Image (spheres, helix red, strand yellow):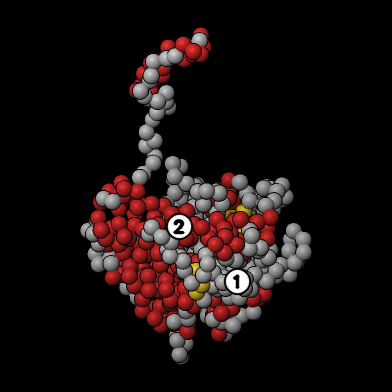
Amino acid sequence: MISRTSGVRVRLALPCIAAFTIALAGGCEKVTAPLLKATDPDIINPADLASPDGAEALRIGALGRLTQMTTGVDPVTGNEGVFLLGGLLADEWRSGDTFQQRNETDQRNIDSTNSFMNSAWRTVGRARVSALQALGALRQYKPAPKDYQGQMWFVVGFAENQAAEAFCSGIPFSNGAGATPVYGDPLTTDQAFTQAAASFDSALANAPDTLRFRYAAMVGKGRALLNLGRYADAAAAVATVPASFTYTVTHSLTTSDNANWALNNNIKRYVVANLDGGTGLNFVAAADPRLPTQSGGNTFEGKPGFVAQLKFARSSPTVIVSGTEAKLIIAEAQLAATPTDTTTWLRTLNTLRSGAGLAPLTDPGTAAGRVDLLFRERAFWMWGTGHRQGDLRRLIRQYQRAPDSVFPTGAFPKGGNYGTDVALPIPTSERNNPKYTSACVKSQA
């Protein structure tokens, strides 16, 4: 769009242009203003961030990056993040696509040069570093309300925990918030979860007044401790979180679509899976009201068998932390207690189900059956919210399940067999980090 001022400048320059066409040597009056000049309102200079308004802009930006990491997309490539790719590697989704990047993820045989892994890795890093950058600005220019600092620490911890659940061991958490990048050393999976728990502690220490931020940090810490196998500590961390609590990332027509809807319902590259690879849950056949689906039509690649999810619409928010998750953490701690508290464990699960109008469960009667039931409940309650891949890895790491007994296995529907990956690879772009020397073992839980 040309401004009125720009239009005036064009008119002043026209005689000069005409004169130039008549005689090149005829000269022209000097025009002091450029032919076209407009200030780009979208450009924010770094100096403009050194203010309370700048600090607030960085905070809002970090929340936007959190959305991109979860059920948004990488703004550079338009590719999905770890929530969908993790669910594709696990048993929530299957590929209805022609793109090799998604097909090899579905097949559990992912190359480290897979560009979609690079996009997902980038969204995690951006969310974390953006929050760290916002933290520095909030401390200096907008120290009150302090709770905003707690919210940013929550984003940091959430990104760290999600990275540890999704990617293979040897995770480097670098920091580009300052003028000079600080490269991170590769961390083992447990070290990454420990760091995430510490970040959630910082969130709690810096959010004294806002219950929403505190509850989010409590559940985040409980999730990190659960990933470490510290069941009693995890239950204690979430003990006061109400069942009704939710913390969401939002979508809208003017910002971004919910990627669950966009890649499934809209363009049909993702298909809701059912008994994926013979080991996956019956997400479609169960007809569970927590995951409504609709079958019919062709996938993006033109093959029959498309299944749409009806849990998320185009602009639906995504619950990434909830009181429901807190109660499920408590239930797992009850199951892991010595002696196992099966009565209270079952009551905890059925209280959640009663609130949603679901029929009560009965005790399977065996230790293995109880674990299966607990993880099934987790899968249906939190489908599409970035938990399933991490849960399957925990079944291997903490419950001694064989990888092929929990991840899809056998003949791959598009040819060949499923591979052995249980984790997303650290992409080759991380080799630019001089400290990144660890080998990524994708089959290691």
User: Relative to 126, is 392 above or below?
Assistant: below
For label 2, the residue is 126
In this view, the residue in front, 163 or 247, is 163
Residue with the most extreme left position:
144
User: Relative to 257, is 192 above or below?
Assistant: below
Q: Amino acid at mark 2?
A: Arg
**Snapshot quadrant of residue 278:** bottom right
Residue 82 visible at all: no
Q: CA distance from mark 1 to mark 2?
A: 21 Å
Q: 209 left or right of 127?
A: left
User: Relative to 14, is 337 above or below?
Assistant: below
Disc 1 secondary structure class: loop
For label 1, the residue is 440
Q: Amino acid at mark 1?
A: Cys
Q: 184 left or right of 77?
A: left
Residue with the most extreme bottom position:
339
- Residue at position x 66%, y 66% from top? 108
The mark nearer the N terminus, 1 or 2, is 2
